[in-house]
Each structure stands twice: as structure tokens, then as C-alpha cells.
Image (cartoon, helix red, strand yellow):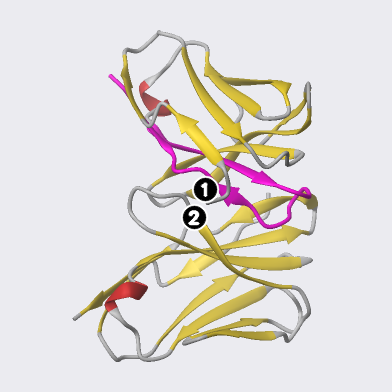
Amino acid sequence: DAGITQSPRHKVTETGTPVTLRCHQTENHRYMYWYRQDPGHGLRLIHYSYGVKDTDKGEVSDGYSVSRSKTEDFLLTLESATSSQTSVYFCAISTQQGYEAFFGQGTRLTVV
Amino acid sequence: TQLLEQSPQFLSIQEGENLTVYCNSSSVFSSLQWYRQEPGEGPVLLVTVVTGGEVKKLKRLTFQFGDARKDSSLHITAAQPGDTGLYLCAGQGGSSARQLTFGSGTQLTVLP
């Protein structure tokens, strides 16, 4: 257990509503990541953080924003959810960027 | 964008059989990682290979990094039902040096 907690684990929301997913770590790792996983696409990086208030975009960042006000928490926000954002979202942490990643259990988000 | 192609996408075999999963790219990676993911869970790191030509063994699993560091393979000997899962390769380095690039995965089912 890498000490990563994602919440909620499941969520159903309506198109156009804002949604925030939370990732909490107890490992004090510097790097945190948000990925989405869709059939046939593997894991795609949405945003990542390399420290408190330091974040950057990943491969599929459109429609998503993030915030990291504390080392242990990394929030992913969908400002106005769309059906294309229905996916399983994973948070991950690592000690170095691009190094071995430890993943949370995922959040299954359905946008109807 | 770097791409990692995994093959086969799906593999269903009988207990006791051997199998090989491939991970190929046109890009050179500093290192390559293999993860296994079970339903409802996040990926779990199996191994990291760093040196071209490197071979690592983990019980019945053998991982190899290509000499040119563009490809990797995972060989499982005498597969067991407990090996069932989604196997993901992930490359670190290359043109996007700091990020992990994930393959789309190989879904392995081992039938008893």
C-alpha cells in the first residue's frame, strides 16, 4: 500500500456540472500525477505537479484544471463535465519525475 | 508524441502455457517499466529495466530491454490463473524526458 487515497471512488454527474476529484498521499512524495484510462488508450497523463503550487499540463489537459496547495493533496477539477470525460481517473505519485509510479485505486466517473 | 505499441492487445491461454508480450517504440527510452493491473485497482509496478540488453527475472516472469532501448518484452513461463490481468509497459525519457509514456496494454487471461 503506497499510501494514496482517491476520493470519491465512484461518481455519476450530469453534463455541464463541475466535478472535483481528490488525491491524498501520506508518502510526502514530490511528484503527483493525474491520468485517465480508457479502453484502447492505456493511461494518458492529464496534469502533473512537481511541488506545492507547481503544476504543468500533460497530454490530454483540455477541460481539466488542477491545484496543489499542500504536499499531500492534488485536486483534479472538471469545470464543466462532458460525456467525453467519462473515464477511470488514476492518481499516481513518484519520488522523481518519470520514475517508478505508485497508483491509487482509481475513480470511476460517469458523465450523463 | 512518443508512442509505445503493445502486442498482442488480448491474449487468452491455458494454465501451464508460456507467453510473450511485446512493447515497441520508434523512440529511445532511458528506462522502461512494466506494470500489472487487476480489475478495480491501479497499476502495480513489476520491474524497471534501464540498460540496453538487460534481462530481469521475477519468478516465472522474464523481462528484457532491447539493445537499442526502443523495445521490451515480457515472457511468462507456465502461466497460472493468478497471472491474469492487464499488463502495461511505460517508457521514461526520450523527447519528453521527464514523463512516463504508457502503452495501451495487453489483457491476459489464463484459464484453469
Q: Which residue is mark 2?
A: B43
For the point 67% across and 55% down, which residue is it?
Answer: B2
Tell me residue B100's x, y (percent): 67, 52
What's under tag 1, amino acid-wise? Leu
Task: Tell me if residue A57 comes above or below residue B4 in the rendering.
Answer: above
Q: What is the count of numbered marks? A: 2
Q: Residue furthest top?
A: A17
How many residues crowd around disc 2 within 10 Å: few (fewer than 14), some, or many (20 or more)? Answer: many
Q: Residue furthest left?
A: B112
Q: Secondary structure at mark 1?
A: strand
- Tag shown at residue A43: 1
The reply to whether residue B65 is in sight is yes
What's under tag 2, amino acid-wise? Pro
The residue lying toward the viewer, choosing from B52 and B110, is B110
How many residues crowd around disc 1 within 10 Å: few (fewer than 14), some, or many (20 or more)? Answer: many
User: Where does the magenta region start and end?
Assistant: A87-112
For the point 57% across and 43% down, which residue is it?
Answer: A3
Tell me residue B67's x, y (percent): 75, 84
Q: Are marks 2 and 1 in contact (CB under 8 Å)?
A: yes
Mark 2 or 1, closer to the camera: 2
Task: Tell me if residue A67 comes above or below residue B26 in the rendering.
Answer: above
For the point 33% across and 70% down, which residue is it?
Answer: B84
**Callout 1: chain:** A
Q: Quadrant of residue A85?
A: top left
- Tag shown at residue A53: none
The residue lying toward the viewer, choosing from A33 and A2, is A2
